[in-house]
Amino acid sequence: MTIFKYLKDSLKTIVCFLLILIVIDLILITSTDISKTKYDIIYMDVLCSAIFLGYLVIDYVMWNKRYTELRKALNRSERVENNLITGDTFEEQLMREIIDYKNKEKYEETSKLKRNLDEINDYITKWVHEIKIPLSVLELLTDKIEDNKLHSISEELRREIERINFLINQVLYISRASNYSQDFTVEEVNLKTIVKSVIQNNVNSFLSKNIEIEMDNIDYYVYTDSKWAYYVVEQIINNSFKYVGYNGKIQISAIQDDKGVTLIIRDNGMGIPQKDIDRIFDKGFTGENGRKTSKSTGMGLYICKKISENLNFDIEVSSKVSEYTEFRIIFYKFSDYLKVTKM
């Protein structure tokens, strides 16, 4: 809101004043003896110019004050309300009406979008609960197959059931991620309990590729939401499973320092190319490894990063192609969770 902007907006008024002053001077010069009125004309011009300059100064101060709050709100990307514009000119009344109209339009669009998202979330939630019924039936059938000594078939079925359960839970978590702040509780959680639960729920998958799970001391307590922490840990371990070959190894350990507790998940799989490592948390990004395996949606790590940003823990990754990939989940001390922001 500079004075140059104001002068540019007031250019027509300034030109009009100068033209009027010139016309008056020409009339006085042509109708009187110039030698007698020259100083009077100069005096009049100076006086009128001073008055007009005073008007411009006062009008600039009022103009700047009138729109300063509106400009500040726009610069801070805040909601613009009509009370930010004062005054009763036609222009100001019109701006207030435009703001009211756009706020109403935005509210209606947001409400419509929220209704659509709620419908999708409701559908996904109902679909998940419905599909769990045939999954339970499959598990019962698997038990019967085992009773008939057909272990190879039962193991294959159980692996696929684990995979389906993982994918169903992933859909459920993604559907909740947009408004998950209504569905979390920060509490003291045992890392060992979470990791063991993840391994137990995916044990048949690990056995199918003869993957060795090596756990050091991870018996630490951290402050986080257990449900969302389980999702993050399961997603990262599942990624390790996908990209580790037969007879591979996944090492899980933890360290504690002044910042908090860091859970380390390291595998000896194919590794992540350097050109992809900075993009693995991007939405929909599958990278070179995802294209090789045809098993990646590019959503799992994106949701993990989104959760970590809002639950105030960090996820770091390092890797070397054909050697290893290491994920580090850093859970900070309890005092840092006071910074948790809701979406």
Image (cartoon, helix red, strand yellow):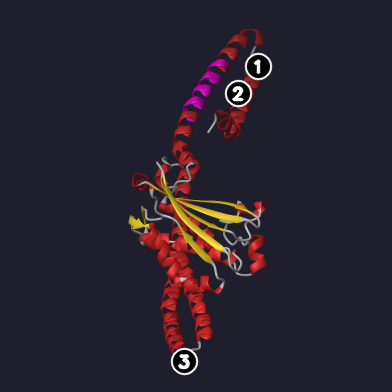
Q: Nearer the viewer, mark 2 or mark 1?
A: 2
Q: Is residue 72 left or right of residue 46?
A: left
Three-letter amino acid code of the residue under disc 3: Asn
Q: Quadrant of residue 198?
A: bottom left
Residue occupied by mark 2: 21
| The residue stretch that appears in magenta | 46-59
Say which element carries label 1. Answer: helix
Q: Are marks 1 and 3 in contact (CB under 8 Å)?
A: no
**Mark number, residue 29:** 1
For badge 2, the amino acid type reads Leu
Q: From this viewpoint, is residue 317 visible?
A: yes
Q: At which x and y percent is residue 50?
A: 53, 19
The residue to which callout 3 is attached is 148
Q: Residues within 10 Å of mark 2 (few under 14, many from 20)?
A: some
In-image side of 299 versus 38 (left or right)? left
Give the mark nearer the N terminus: 1 vs 3.
Answer: 1
Measuring from the top left, give residue 79's x and y in whole percent.
44, 48
**Residue under the image location 55 percent in, 70 percent down:** 210
Mark 1 crowdedness (10 Å alpha carbons): few <14, some 14-19, many ≥20: some
Q: Where does residue 124 sit, x and y in percent of width and height?
A: 45, 74
Which amino acid type is marked by label 1? Ile
268 part of magenta stretch: no
* 74 w.r.t. 177: above or below: above
